[in-house]
Amino acid sequence: MKLRASLLALSSGITLLSTSAAWAVNCENARYEANSYTLCEVDLQTEDLRLFLRDEAGAILGQFSSVSKSLGEDETLIFAMNAGMYHANRAPVGHYMQDGVQEQSLLTAASPGNFGLLPNGVFCIRDGRADVIETLRFAKEAPVCRDATQSGPMLVIDGALHPRFLVDSSTSYIRNGVGTSSDGRRAVFVISNNPVTFHEFGRFFRDVLKLPNALYLDGKVSRLMAPDLNRSDLGFWLGPIVGVVEKN
């Protein structure tokens, strides 16, 4: 089911602001409670979702424009978003796999900051499906991912909000994340258009999108490229980037 149909089937608590069907990736603006979000849904069985980090020389790409330039002449980047936390040199903080090659191993211990606010998780891309998987489950099951990026905290874990999220938190940022359907076919990427708390952001994935598992990708540096909305955010240089590539 496409995102537009999913949203229209929801309660009146959400207001759909705009829709577009010009591109294969369906991106829409929506409001829920007092907050504004942009959502982009990817169908893993029909769309080519990839992670991007470095160019052929090993330099980190860092910008959506650089990702576009790195593609083949017959390829176009039709959606992109930052895809996980990174160090000052923009190398991934946690587990990172791209096209079957691992750059960083899985981190399972708690640590300071949002990444280590356990439980955290891994966004795993396989042929025809993508899944958000809690880190300890990922370590136990060892799924074979073509591309994978670890981040944290989890926003939704098997239908439940992260246990550390506070309904009365005063900490708000522009945030982005990804949730996946139980069959792995749908990945829904969300960025808030105004500062939101973790509790507000997690509830959007759980209560509005009805996705069983969702992962926080980052905050404050969050950026989106959505050509069908005439949007390509400028800002901080990025580490991992996720995007959909379309053949011309």
Image: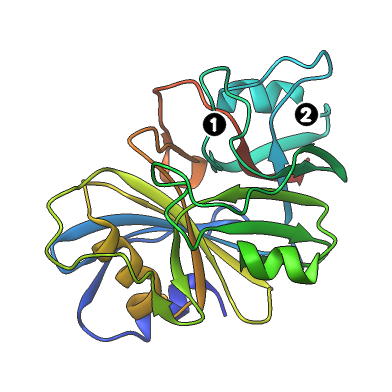
Q: Looking at this view, is 148 or 35 the one in front? A: 148
Please give the label number shown on residue 86: 1
Question: Which amino acid lies under the numbered mark 1 shown in the image of this protein?
Answer: Tyr
Quadrant in the picture for residue 54: top right
Please give the label number shown on residue 16: none
Give percent across and percent down for residue 13: 20, 79
Question: Which amino acid lies under the numbered mark 2 shown in the image of this protein?
Answer: Leu
**Quarter the C terminus occupies:** top right
Q: Looking at this view, is 147 or 223 the one in front? A: 147
Give percent across and percent down for residue 28: 40, 59
Quadrant in the picture for residue 44: bottom right
Quadrant in the picture for residue 89: top right
The answer to whether residue 181 is above or below residue 47 is: below
What's the residue at 34%, 66% (across, down)? Answer: 202
What's the residue at 17%, 68% (across, down)? Answer: 167
Is 52 left or right of 5, judged from the image as shown?
A: right
- Could you say whether the residue bearing mark 1 is in a helix, strand or loop? loop
